[in-house]
Image: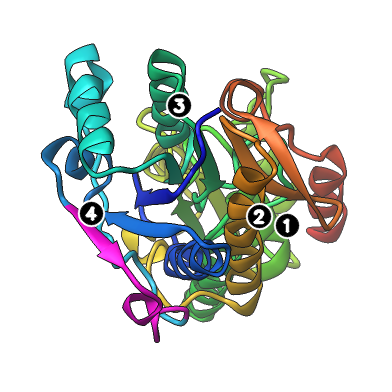
Amino acid sequence: MAKIRCVGVLTSGGDAPGMNAAIRSVTRSAISNGFKVKAIYRGFEGLMNGEVKSFTTEDVSNIIQTGGTILRTARSEAFMTAAGRKRAYDTLIKEGIDALIVIGGNGSLTGAMTLAEEYDFPCIGLPGTIDNDLYGTDTTIGYDTTLNTIMSCVDKIRDTAQSHERIFFIEVMGRDAGFLAQNSAIAAGAEAAIIPEDSTGADQLGQFMERGIRKSKKSCMVIVSESPKCGAMYYAERVKKEYPQYDVRVSILGHLQRGGSPSAHDRVFASRVGVGAIDALVKGQRNVMVGVRNNEIVYVPFVEAVAKHKPMDPQLIQVLDELSI
């Protein structure tokens, strides 16, 4: 493998609180290990278009506490084509970048994996997604902050739910993974969570209505993972039709879940995996995602990180069931 002298870094896909902490960590760790750093703006789209800038330690000063990503981000359909990836590779060669660090979620790491395979190019992924759905790591950059944001919102909505004796269906992000819904429901004391991991075929709404609505409770909070077909609106409409005696409202939290200053946990996690990415390159690792499992840095092959399903701990479902009585 050719000697690595210059490292490129980009953020891709949906933004997540803590991405700036990861950019800072990658940049400073790389410089500390004798590498040059080139930042790529607007993800793979910017890589194809040559939006590249040399970074120093000063470029990442005072960003650890900020949300979003200073490198901006984008979703790129062009990069999904062979011609688009050729343009991206040409930029890497032109800029003298010897290895690429990609901070993003499932789609972003899939793009990094494909680029690495096609051009035998060293790529390292960092798990940057609020959904916490990447296999092989206990958590992801942005997940903890988003969980706390949802909890805070549910706490406020409960005041209105109790005042008006209503059922609130609160929709959160996590289309294919219910970690945000399940854990925010536990943290906020909600009565139920409707998540995509429930593969029993049972009617989750019916189970909730039978168990969760009782004379002793004048209000109820149900956290629902977003879905184009069965989101919070779908379940609220069902309750209106099937249980017209109840007053029902919907709150879709939307993009406010992505914003805000990252929590201490996300800052520390992002800093650890950022340093871990440079350590991986120093050790000759390539085409892996850097994660943390059982409080230890781990290297997860891209094919496992993006292809394997991250399971929901069934004990979490039991915890919510028992505490919502």
x and y percentages locating residue 240 in the rendered image: 42, 44
Residue, disc 1: 214
Mark sitting earlier along the chain (3/2): 3
Give the residue at mark 2. Answer: 276
Mark 2–mark 4 Cα distance, whole angstroms, equals 22 Å
Q: Which mark is residue 291?
A: none
Q: Residue at left 45%, top 49%? A: 5
Circle 4 crowding by C-alpha within 10 Å: few under 14, some 14–19, many from 20: many
Residue bearing the label numbered 4: 41
Q: Residue furthest bottom?
A: 62
| Foreground: disc 3 or disc 2 | 2
| Residue 199 in the image, given as x and y percentages of width and height | 68, 21
Rate crowding at label 3 as few (under 14), some (14 to 19) or many (20 or more) other CA atoms within 10 Å: some
Residue at 40%, 77% (x, y): give it: 57
Q: CA distance from mark 3 to mark 4?
A: 19 Å
Pointers 1 and 3 in contact (C-beta within 8 Å): no
Q: Amino acid at mark 3?
A: Thr
Magenta stretch bounds: 52-64
Nearest to the observer: residue 187 or residue 238: 187
